[in-house]
Amino acid sequence: MVMSSHPKAAHLDRMLTMEMARVVEAAAVAAARERGQGDEKKADQVAVDAMRRELNNLPISGRIVIGEGERDEAPMLYIGEEVGYGGPEVDIALDPLEGTTICAKNQPNSLAVIAIAERGKLLYAPDVYMDKIAIGPGYPAGTINIDASPTENLNAVAKAKGCKVSEVSTCVMDRTRHTKLIEEVRAAGAAIRLIGDGDVAGIIHTTDPDETGIDLYMGIGGAPEGVLAAAALRCTGGQMQGRLILDTPEKEARAAKMGVSEPNKAYTMDEMAQGDVLFAACGVTDGNMLRGVKFANDGIYTHTVAMRSSTGTIRWVDGKHAVSSKF
Ligand code: VTB
């Protein structure tokens, strides 16, 4: 990761990995106080406030490239906002509350997430849909192909895994736009898990099928979430492809403005998040990989994963925060 030419500068970004944990913990705790309250906007807002506050305490010159939206629609953590009090120039993709609806209903797998990369190394994805496919580590390169049919991908994953298609578990967001996809997965005989929201978690879940029961993710979700998921997979290993859905001239123009020169391109995970990438996620509600925030008499408990692509280090951080802490 670019920091400075000083030989000790490497320590800076190592420290930054742990700082990322702090940033997502703060957002997760704030959002967790709103779990189940049915107020998505409020849950999101408190997470945004907390994440922004923590980011501004960091010695970085950070620029939000994937955030809460365009400047005119999001007053905080908007695309282009600068955060931190000065330091290495980094680009930041974040979602202080990924799965606002999940949190508002207190259902599984809402997260606070952030990814940090060197300047210019993240895909500047507009807020459009992205078609995505992902598997975890351990498969031969080229096992999945976004241009192949779901059946072909299921067969390829089963073959690489050395199992039957019926033993390949696929995660898909429960949307009418996926009716045909869901039918095809079922017809192929594969297991399927439908999720209401939160495909960043859905994709990350492919990296640990023994724990999560998910081998393959397929379907259409948000493009910004696609870049966040790609950053995570860069750290854990795995394969992912994503194609922006630019089905109107207006969306194409928006993407072009953000520097997307090939609108029909199927981006690989390495193209969506290049170079050294740091990624962290903290559970807001209980999930398949991360426990949600627990408010106990003796402290506030958080569960976070913090990872770095250049070293492949994955840290699971159990946090216990004083009840009196700023959280
Ligand atoms: C997608 C998905 C997200 O919201 O953006 C989704 O990537 C919105 O999809 O993980 P719809 O427009 O179909 O509702 C999430 O599920 C949560 O932010």
Image (tube, rainbow, N blue to C red):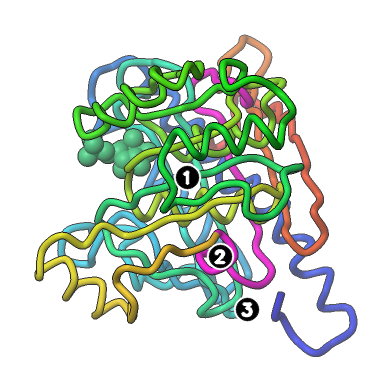
Give the residue drawn at x 64%, y 20%. Answer: 164
**Are the residues at dot 3 and dot 1 in contact (C-beta closer than 8 Å)?**
no
Callout 1: helix, strand or loop?
strand
| Image quarter (top left, top right, bottom left or bottom right) of the N terminus | bottom right
Residue 273 is labelled as 2
Callout 3: helix, strand or loop?
loop
User: Residue extending furthest top?
Assistant: 297
Q: Please, what is the three-letter code of the amino acid marked with disc 3?
A: Gly
Q: Please, what is the three-letter code of the amino acid marked with disc 2?
A: Ala
Q: Please, what is the three-letter code of the amino acid marked with disc 1?
A: Ile
**Are the residues at dot 2 and dot 1 in contact (C-beta closer than 8 Å)?**
no
* Residue placed under numbered mark 3 in the picture: 87
**Separation of residues labelled 3 and 2 (CA atoms):** 21 Å
Answer whether residue 20 is magenta in the image.
no
Query: Is disc 3 surrounded by few (<14), some (14 to 19) or many (20+) residues within 10 Å?
Result: some
Residue 126 rendering spot, x and y as whole percentages? 29, 64
Please state the extent of the stretch shown in magenta in the rendering.
269-290
